[in-house]
Image: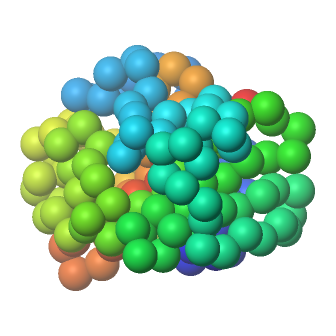
Amino acid sequence: MPRFVKAFFGPVLGGLALFAVTSGHVPAQAPSIAGVSLGMSARDVRAVLGGPAVQQQSLGMRFWEFPGRGITVIWRDEAAGVSAIVLTKRNAGEIRGVRVGDSSQAIAANWGAPVRVRNDGRFLDFAGRGWTLSTEVAKGKAIEITLLAAH
């Protein structure tokens, strides 16, 4: 299970779901990552990514992990489709021009100013209509990116 989910999923769901405006350069429509988008069914995700290497269930959510690809897909039990997509490796793909490993400057150039900065700059949060992006930054580089549907 990604670090983000273990330590911060609750606060992100509670806080970011409240944002209704688009920040910076982040457009209203939620991005797709590696062919997976928010709201997709498990069958459709399997058709795109294949079967997960690890499946877990915890905290009212199901997690499909693809560690070789650096992707975790998350479903909330009460939601019909994908609720979140977490990227942990550079080869996982990009979200609106940003990949894991990119600098804070590259994030700002592609996404604009965050709507919220948490933990002294460790987490940068961006919002669209019905979705949010959260990037964990360490040593000036993105180490994890999460796309989350606001339910």
Check the image and report above or below for 47 versus 130.
below
Residue at (72% x, 69% y) in the render: 55
Where is residue 14 shown, x and y percent of the image?
Answer: 72, 46
Mark yes or no: residue 129 visible: yes
Quadrant where the image shows the C terminus? top right
Where is residue 49 shown, x and y percent of the image?
Answer: 49, 52
Observer-nearest of 47 and 119: 47
Res 25 quadrant in image = top left
Q: Residue furthest bottom?
A: 139
Check the image and report above or below for 54 versus 130.
below
Observer-nearest of 107 and 18: 107
Mark yes or no: residue 116 visible: no
Observer-nearest of 83 and 109: 83
Residue at (78% x, 58% y) in the render: 62
Quadrant where the image shows the N terminus? bottom right
Residue at (25% x, 37% y) in the render: 96
Judged left or right of residue 88, residue 85 is: right
The count of marks equals: 0
Judged left or right of residue 148, residue 95 is: left
